[in-house]
């Protein structure tokens, strides 16, 4: 073999050998590139196939989850509907059994309202529904709302249309006939006043700092400055310009503007003191603080006579 190779090399020119070697190298290089391209093509095709099956599987899983979610939602809705039907039946039985107690006992009535509110039931939503027919609670609050309007209108010349809920409650209890003297709570008055809002902005609740409320029964809303001055006057039933400037950190012009507005609306009364310190009394807060039970009638009447004079 080696002898034949040597004989071939000796008899073949060098240039011819170089040409053949280069040709062989090109052939080998081409084969290697072809094999590499085939390998890459196969690898790319495998990745595409895997990606296709992965996406198809993900879509299938998502569809199954959606179907299962819809099934669970239908089951939960059916269960909720059944529970709501049972609750409605039990609530109707409860109201029929305790109808008189709900109308007579204000605390019991409040708990009943809270229980209804927790499940989205409003006994005051309609006067012609189940509650008005079976329970009568709707009629109770509508009658109370009418009496609130009457009391507030009769005292507007005294307090400027602003009265504490407690004072309003005392007047309501005195004005109700003995046959209708069911206990009235603060919560009852707040609910009835809230229903009066459908008539416009004539009736509003003003929150005081201690958790008490004032009932405003005149058209037009009190602004934020008015409310803050009323809250400041809650303890002593009066304020002064100097007190407002000190406690609320207001300038003199702002304090004077609020006091002038309250006096103009009849909500505050001016009391000129010998010390040159003008006090601005809030009649509704004064009545609440200094008038109690039996003596409240005489004091209120005396204040009314002064206002008329």
Image (cartoon, rainbow, N blue to C red):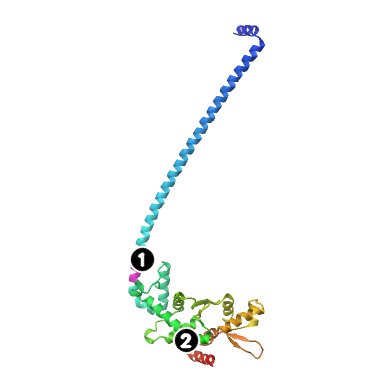
Total number of numbered labels?
2
Label 2 residue SS: helix
Q: Quadrant of the C terminus?
A: bottom right
Q: Position of residue 231 (x, y in %)?
A: 57, 78
Q: Is residue 24 above or below residue 76?
A: above
Front one among 37 and 175: 37
Q: Quadrant of the N terminus?
A: top right
Would residue 46 be visible to someone looking at this image? Answer: yes
Q: Position of residue 99 (x, y in %)?
A: 35, 76
Tag shown at residue 99: none
Which image quadrant for residue 61? top left
Would residue 236 be visible to someone looking at this image? Answer: no
Predominant secondary structure, magenta span: helix
Label 1 residue SS: helix
Residue density around tag 2, few if under 14, some if 14–19, many if 20 or more, within 10 Å: few
Mark toward the start of the polypeptide (2 vs 1): 1
Which image quadrant for residue 106? bottom left
- Residue tagged 2: 154
Look at the image and say whether residue 68 sits in the magenta stretch: no
Front one among 306 and 186: 306
Image: magenta residue range: 86-94
Q: Position of residue 119 (x, y in %)?
A: 41, 66
Residue name at image x 35 percent, y 67 percent? 88
Q: What separation in Å lies between label 2 and label 1 (alpha carbons)? A: 44 Å
Look at the image and say whether residue 91 sits in the magenta stretch: yes
Q: Position of residue 189 (x, y in %)?
A: 45, 78
Tag shown at residue 87: 1
Q: Is residue 151 above or below residue 51?
A: below
Q: Is residue 38 above or below residue 234?
A: above
Front one among 270 and 77: 270
Residue density around tag 1, few if under 14, some if 14–19, many if 20 or more, within 10 Å: few
């Amino acid at each position: 073999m080696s002898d034949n190779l040597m004989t071939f090399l000796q008899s073949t020119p060098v240039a011819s050998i170089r040409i053949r070697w280069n040709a062989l190298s090109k052939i080998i290089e081409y084969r290697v590139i072809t094999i590499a391209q085939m390998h890459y093509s196969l690898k790319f095709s495998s990745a595409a196939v895997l990606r296709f099956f992965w996406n198809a599987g993900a879509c299938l899983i998502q569809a199954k989850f959606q179907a299962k979610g819809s099934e669970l939602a239908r089951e939960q809705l059916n269960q909720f509907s059944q529970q709501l039907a049972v609750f409605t039946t039990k609530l109707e039985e409860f109201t029929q059994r305790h109808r008189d107690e709900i109308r007579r006992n204000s605390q019991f009535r409040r708990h009943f309202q809270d229980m209804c509110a927790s499940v989205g039931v409003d006994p005051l939503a309609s006067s012609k529904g189940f509650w008005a027919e079976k329970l009568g609670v709707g009629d109770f609050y509508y009658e109370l709302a009418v009496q609130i309007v009457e009391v507030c209108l009769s005292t507007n010349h005294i307090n400027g249309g602003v009265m504490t809920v407690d004072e309003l409650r005392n007047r309501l209890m005195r004005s109700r006939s003995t046959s209708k003297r069911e206990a009235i709570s603060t919560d009852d008055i707040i609910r009835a006043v809230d229903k009066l809002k459908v008539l416009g902005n004539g009736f509003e609740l003003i929150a005081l700092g201690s958790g008490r409320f004032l009932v405003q029964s005149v058209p037009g809303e009190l602004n934020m400055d008015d409310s803050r001055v009323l809250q400041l006057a809650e303890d002593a039933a009066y304020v002064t310009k100097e007190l407002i400037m000190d406690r609320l950190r207001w300038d003199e012009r702002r304090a004077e503007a609020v006091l002038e507005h309250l006096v103009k609306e009849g909500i505050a009364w001016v009391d000129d003191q010998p010390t040159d310190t003008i006090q601005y009394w809030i009649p509704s807060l004064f009545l609440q603080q200094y008038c109690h039970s039996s003596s409240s009638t005489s004091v209120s009447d005396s204040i009314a006579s002064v206002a008329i004079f």
